[in-house]
Every structure is written in structure tokens, then in C-alpha cells.
Image (cartoon, rainbow, N blue to C red):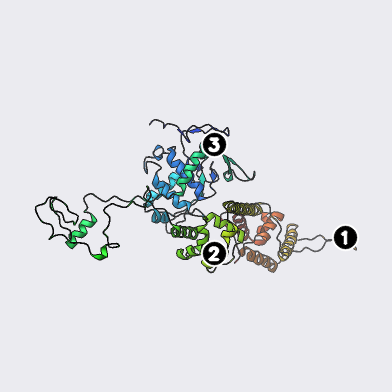
């Protein structure tokens, strides 16, 4: 198969920024690079900017599924965009296959195909991969919505890391070339529109709805071209139509006049969708709020639409609401989501009355999220270093006394049961001191109780200080092996030991 022609996105235009828009040949991410840690793209800050990249991939033709597989969809089309729309609404992006099947009406295999296409196009990256074990509940995969590096190169987008120590996928957009602004505006329009499932066209063999109803009720009678059943008939028919003409009842007339024969212009747009009015916009805004805010899940959409009517009429978005809620503060406990939202949004449209103020609030909210993310990363690193580092003495004073006493007894056993004591009066040796059976049993009981709580400091400290053989003579081989296994498991990220 011949190689596809290179596609230039956007068309050639002079660049005032001095950044030339590149010409790309293909777009494909192998399976080994479909993870967040190995991806070359950057994380999309919101679903809106991610949908711009999705529409760019769909329209560029740089990714064709049939180049890399012999089965599945033939192209990156509107069905893939519909699946992406559902993913753009999720936070975090952790969709289940059954959820996407229910939302899109596709089959399970089709959903898996389109998710794979989004990963191969560099638009999705695994954070956690789901599992399917026979007899257990299936775990859904968690994805990161990514913007491919080819998108930035094609539109001349400049990116930079806000923190040099952060991973490369956290870089943010800082500017765009003049040549890519027009295409970015077109992608913005597409990202705001919803792609819906196409309606099936009625079959030509099926009878019309009015004809089928008339046939059942016996109202409509088929006539020839010469005989007409309408009061507006003006013709040369030789048969009088006065006996077959019936005027419509009063209830069918408006203002005492019949309907005009001239069809009215449809209020629908060219694409078949009508523009939402004020009430429709409120309900759409309320539905988005119940999907994005966890503490509004399950709330009545009409009630939320009434509560948020002022900010919806002011042109707010869900992101603007999140920025305002960060400014107001979070509640530790929510008993009634609609009531809390009414309190938090009181007077919000008057405080943030301009788009610039709302944009500043959103920027502060995103900065707080980034700071919280860095704090979590530091906590994980500190915990990992603590578990993977050298052994440290226990913090409990009682455990420290037990450890010191055990070390002293172990040293006595290692020296042949003798303790060297210096006496100022006489320089002689004390009689040999050996552990009795009762003392040995007490030590083993103490070590076994600590192992049941997940603490291995007593035995591992003995091993580090006196050696493995001495620890086995004191505590027994079984307890020493158990302590070593627990110590190794505590350093693993796949197991957590807690106290109950």
C-alpha cells in the first residue's frame, strides 16, 4: 500500500511570529508508549481543549486505523468523536465499558475498538489499566486525556514547564503561531457542538404515517386528478363537488381563519438543531453541574437549574463555578447538595461580573489543584523512601526498651553466656549468665505479638545487630522467616499493612 500523502495543518500562511507550521506525515502511538509515564504528549487541562485536539485528529486524516490493523473501524470518524465526548465529561476519566455502551448505544466490541483508536492517536494514555479476572468484579481503566505533540507542532503551539522538576507531560500552552489561530478558532467551534447519533431514515417501502392513520380511521379517500376534495377547488370537472366538500370544524381554525397554504419557515438551524433558549440553557448547565461536582450527584436537575439560574443567565460555565467554589471554600460535610449550592452561589454573578474576573478565579483554582498534586507526589515519595531506606529505630519508648533488652540478651548468648563486668574492688569475671526457657518464651511471645501487628523491628534489629543465626537461636526459625517476609512486603507498593 502506498504511503499516504503528507497533510499540512493548517494551510500555508505567513507567520508573524516566525514559527513555521510543520507538515506531518502520520500519527500513531505504539502500545509501549500508551502510558502516562511514557507518553510524549501533554495532559489536557479540561475537556474543551481536549475536544479541540480530537476534532483536529478526526479532520487531519493523519491517523488511519487500517494502517496498523486488519479489523475494526476503517477511519477515525464521528463515532469515535461521540465516544470522546462522553470521556470529556468524566472527571476523573475512568469509564467502564458497560457505561460507554449504555451512553453511546454501541456494542462492547465497538467501544473497545474506539478506545484503542484514541490511545493509538495519542489522545488517551493509561494511568491505571483495568483488570478482568474470572469470578471477580471487573475494574475499569483510568485514562489521562492527552494532547499529542503533533497537534502542537502542526498549529505552532508553544509550551513550557511551569516547574522544571515536574514531568514533561505537565507542560502548559504559552502561545500559538499566527498561522494556527484561524484553525484553532474553527476547532473551538467544533468542540462546543455535540455530535449525536445519526437518525435512521424511514424505509421507502413503509407507508407514510398519515396514510396509515387514515387507512385505519377511514377518513381519507383516494380520488383521481379530476375530482378533488378541497373547498379551494377551481377546475373544469363535470362532476359537482358540493356534496363531497366538508369544512373544517371551529376547533381546527385559528382566529376564525384557516391555515395558510404557504409553509412557515422552520426555526431549526441548518444542521437540524435548534438554539437553546434561556430555560434550555439553564437545564443544560444544571446537568453539567450534576455530572462534574461529586456532591451534586443524584440531585434533581430542575432544582439545580432553578438554583443556578442567575449564573447560567450570566453565561457562566462549569469551570467558572469550580473557580468560584474554590474561592468560597469547600464544605467538609454535605447533607443537601442543592441547598449548599444555593448558599455558595448567592451573589456570585455580581462579584465575578466580567469574564476577566472569572478567568482569574479559574486560574487560581487550577494553581491550587497543581499545588495539591505536587503535595501528594511529595508524600508518596517520602513514604516510598521511608519504606525502601535503611532500618530505623522504633519511635515507641516501650518497644525501644524491649529492643535494648533483647540486644543485651543476644550479646550475652553470643559471648558464651558470660557477661564481663568490671569491679573496682576486684578484677574477676561474673558467673556465666544464660537465657532460661521462660525468658526465651517471653521474647518469642513478644516478637510474635508484634508480628501480628505488622511490626518487625524487634526481630530485624536482632538480625542486623547479631546476625541471622543468633536471631534464629533466640526467636526460632519460623518467626525469623515470617519477619523477613513481612519486612519485604512492607517495602512493596502493592501491599499495605495497617493496624485494626
Q: Nearer the viewer, residue 369 or 325?
A: 325
Where residue 127 sits: x, y (%)?
A: 52, 50
The C terminus, quarter of image: bottom right
Q: Are marks 2 and 1 in contact (CB under 8 Å)?
A: no
Q: Which residue is mark 1?
A: 427
Q: Is residue 133 above or below residue 183?
A: below
Q: Which residue is mark 2?
A: 341
Q: Nearer the viewer, residue 121 or 8?
A: 8
Of callouts 3 and 2, the N-terminal one: 3
Mark 3, residues whose alpha carbon is within 10 Å: few (<14), some, or many (≥20)?
A: some
Comparing labels 1 and 3, the label whose residue is closer to the camera: 3
Q: Nearer the viewer, residue 473 or 455?
A: 455
Q: Nearer the viewer, residue 47 or 1?
A: 47
User: How far is mark 1 from mark 3, CA to CA?
Assistant: 94 Å
Please tell me whether mark 2 sits on a helix, a strand or a loop.
helix
Mark 2, residues whose alpha carbon is within 10 Å: few (<14), some, or many (≥20)?
A: some
- Apparent side of residue 83 relative to residue 436 in the rendered image (left or right): left
Q: Residue at x 69, y 57 (%)?
A: 461
Amino acid at each position: 500500500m502506498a504511503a499516504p500523502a503528507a497533510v499540512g495543518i493548517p494551510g500555508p500562511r505567513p507567520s508573524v511570529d516566525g514559527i513555521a507550521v510543520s507538515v506531518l506525515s502520520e500519527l500513531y502511538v505504539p502500545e509501549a508508549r500508551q502510558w502516562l509515564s511514557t507518553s510524549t504528549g501533554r495532559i489536557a487541562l479540561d475537556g474543551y481543549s481536549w475536544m479541540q485536539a480530537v476534532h483536529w485528529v478526526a479532520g487531519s486524516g493523519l491517523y488511519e486505523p487500517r494502517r496498523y490493523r486488519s479489523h475494526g473501524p476503517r477511519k477515525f470518524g464521528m463515532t469515535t468523536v461521540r465516544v470522546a465526548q462522553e470521556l470529556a465529561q468524566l472527571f476523573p476519566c475512568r469509564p467502564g465499558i458497560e457505561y460507554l455502551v449504555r451512553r453511546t448505544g454501541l456494542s462492547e466490541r465497538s467501544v473497545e475498538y474506539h478506545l484503542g483508536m484514541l490511545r493509538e492517536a495519542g489522545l488517551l494514555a493509561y494511568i491505571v489499566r483495568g483488570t478482568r479476572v474470572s469470578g471477580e468484579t471487573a475494574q475499569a481503566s483510568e485514562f489521562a486525556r492527552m494532547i499529542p505533540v503533533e497537534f502542537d507542532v502542526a498549529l505552532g503551539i508553544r509550551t513550557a514547564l511551569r516547574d522544571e522538576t515536574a514531568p514533561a507531560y505537565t507542560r502548559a500552552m504559552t502561545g500559538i503561531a499566527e498561522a494556527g489561530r484561524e484553525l484553532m478558532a474553527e476547532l473551538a467551534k467544533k468542540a462546543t457542538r455535540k455530535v449525536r447519533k445519526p437518525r435512521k431514515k424511514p424505509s421507502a417501502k413503509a407507508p407514510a404515517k398519515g396514510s396509515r392513520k387514515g387507512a385505519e380511521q377511514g377518513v381519507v379517500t383516494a380520488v383521481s386528478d379530476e375530482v378533488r376534495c378541497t373547498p379551494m377547488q377551481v377546475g373544469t370537472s363535470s362532476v359537482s363537488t358540493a356534496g363531497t366538500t366538508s369544512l373544517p370544524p371551529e376547533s381546527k381554525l385559528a382566529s376564525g381563519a384557516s391555515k395558510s397554504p404557504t409553509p412557515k419557515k422552520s426555526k431549526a438551524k441548518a444542521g437540524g438543531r435548534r438554539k437553546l433558549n434561556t430555560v434550555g440553557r439553564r437545564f443544560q448547565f444544571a446537568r453539567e453541574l450534576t455530572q462534574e461536582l461529586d456532591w451534586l450527584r443524584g440531585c434533581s436537575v430542575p432544582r439545580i437549574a432553578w438554583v443556578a439560574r442567575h449564573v447560567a443567565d450570566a453565561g457562566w460555565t462549569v469551570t467558572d463555578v469550580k473557580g468560584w467554589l474554590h474561592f468560597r471554600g469547600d464544605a467538609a460535610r454535605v447533607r443537601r447538595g442543592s441547598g449548599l449550592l444555593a448558599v455558595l452561589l448567592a451573589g456570585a454573578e455580581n462579584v465575578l461580573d466580567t469574564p476577566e474576573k472569572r478567568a482569574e478565579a479559574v486560574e487560581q483554582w487550577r494553581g491550587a489543584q497543581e499545588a495539591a498534586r505536587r503535595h501528594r507526589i511529595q508524600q508518596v515519595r517520602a513514604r516510598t523512601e521511608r519504606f525502601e531506606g535503611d532500618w530505623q529505630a522504633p519511635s515507641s519508648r516501650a518497644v525501644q526498651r524491649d529492643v535494648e533488652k533483647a540486644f543485651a540478651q543476644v550479646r550475652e548468648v553470643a559471648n558464651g553466656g558470660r557477661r564481663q563486668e568490671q569491679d573496682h574492688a576486684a578484677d574477676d569475671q561474673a558467673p556465666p549468665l544464660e537465657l532460661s526457657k521462660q525468658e526465651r518464651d517471653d521474647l518469642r511471645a513478644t516478637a510474635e505479638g508484634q508480628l501480628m501487628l505488622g511490626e518487625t523491628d524487634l526481630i530485624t534489629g536482632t538480625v542486623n545487630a547479631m546476625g541471622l543465626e543468633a536471631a534464629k537461636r533466640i526467636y526460632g526459625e519460623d518467626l525469623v522467616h515470617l519477619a523477613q517476609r513481612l519486612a519485604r512486603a512492607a517495602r512493596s507498593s502493592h501491599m499495605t499493612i495497617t493496624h485494626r
